[in-house]
Image (cartoon, rainbow, N blue to C red):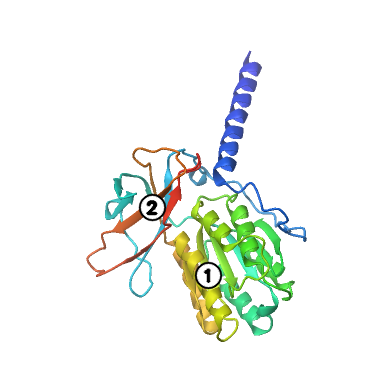
Amino acid sequence: MKTLSTRSKSVQLLKTVSTAVLLILIGTGFGTQPKGTRVSQLPPQSESSNTNTSRNQQIIVNTDLVTLTVSVTDHDGRYVPGLNKKDFTITDNKAPQEIAFFSDVDSPVSVGIVFDVSGSMSGKKIEQAREALAAFIQTSHPQDEYFLIGFNSQPQLLLDRTRDGDAVMKRLSLVEPGGSTALYDASYLALEQVMRGTYAKRALLIISDGEDNDSRYTFSNLRRALRESDVVVYAIGIRGRASGRWSRYGDNVLDELASVSGGKVFFPKNSARMNEALEQIALELRHQYSIGYRPSNFAIDGKWHRVKVKVTPPPEFNRVFIRSREGYFAVGPSR
């Protein structure tokens, strides 16, 4: 009887886990790709690492919990520490909400690195970008996990889920720039990968000139997918042509992708500024506020809900700047 009881509990646990996984996959909305979309032609390398999560790192799925990653900075772009739950107010479609979850812990992040290796990144550009990425990894949380996507005319999953920053840099050093630019396809692939990451905090780091000219996905496809996710986008804009429509268009693309997700874009003028920008991104990821709430009158109606976060700043700060995702679609249980 003891054996049967243990087996019964195991079966029930398996059913519960399977149901949770199915709900997550349904809720992400990333199950399909447009016909003919090209995917990685290179087999990804996976660096072995301990992927077991501790109890306080496990992700709990709530069907009605909206989670926000909030960055609060001063006028110089420095993060504002020491804020408490009572300092934040949230409205959902202008209706005030009660905060159910709050944390300011320096927790690890699942990061999708989207690295442009197209022809426009040849010469000093790619070397400077590699050096800056190394600085980013050095400053990041030691338990961060990385997904490395390189792209030119098609995206390639170069490294799948590793906590070994040296492995990321080694893999990237083997790639030579060339070809056209499929930025949207690569970002979409990175989004799919990072949504399956270990940690609740997720981000994309895009290093590119933003000048897509060979994707099957459109900018609208990618923007919609970002709005449906809780992934924050940070972008480093590598200046392509010195002037002209394409340079401005690339800048605008990166700016919009970052803005819609609550992230930030940087356009460094030299390698020193690029290093500073990536170190700032790494520090910001380590000093964000995680907030969750259950919307009043919650309904899975497929509608867009605009979320507004406000902060009462400490006395020593005259003004603070807040970045978070703009809202969510009430489309599934992963919300």
- Residue 203 at x, y percent in the picture: 53, 59
Nearer to us in this view, 109 or 89: 89
Q: Residue at x 54, y 75 (%)?
A: 249
Nearer to us in this view, 122 or 110: 122
| Residue named by callout 2 | 306
Q: In the drawing, does residue 174 fall left or right of residue 227? A: right
At label 2, counting other C-alpha atoms closer than 10 Å, the crowd grade (few under 14, some 14-19, many 20 or more) is: some
Q: Residue at x 51, y 64 (%)?
A: 257
* Amino acid type, callout 1: Leu
* Amino acid type, callout 2: Arg
Q: Is residue 117 above or below residue 69?
A: below
| Residue named by callout 1 | 254
Quarter of the image where one finds residue 189: bottom right
Nearer to us in this view, 52 or 27: 27
Secondary structure under the numbered disc 1 in the rendered image: helix
Q: Is residue 80 above or below residue 33?
A: below
Callouts 2 and 1 close, C-beta under 8 Å: no
Q: In the drawing, does residue 186 fall left or right of residue 20? A: right
Quarter of the image where one finds residue 136: bottom right
Q: In this orientation, does residue 4 appear?
A: yes
Nearer to us in this view, 172 or 98: 98
Q: Among all residues in the image, which is located at the extreme left?
A: 315
Reading the chain from its start, which is encountered first: label 2 or label 1?
1
Q: In this orientation, does residue 164 appear?
A: no
Q: Among all residues in the image, which is located at the extreme top?
A: 1
Mark count? 2
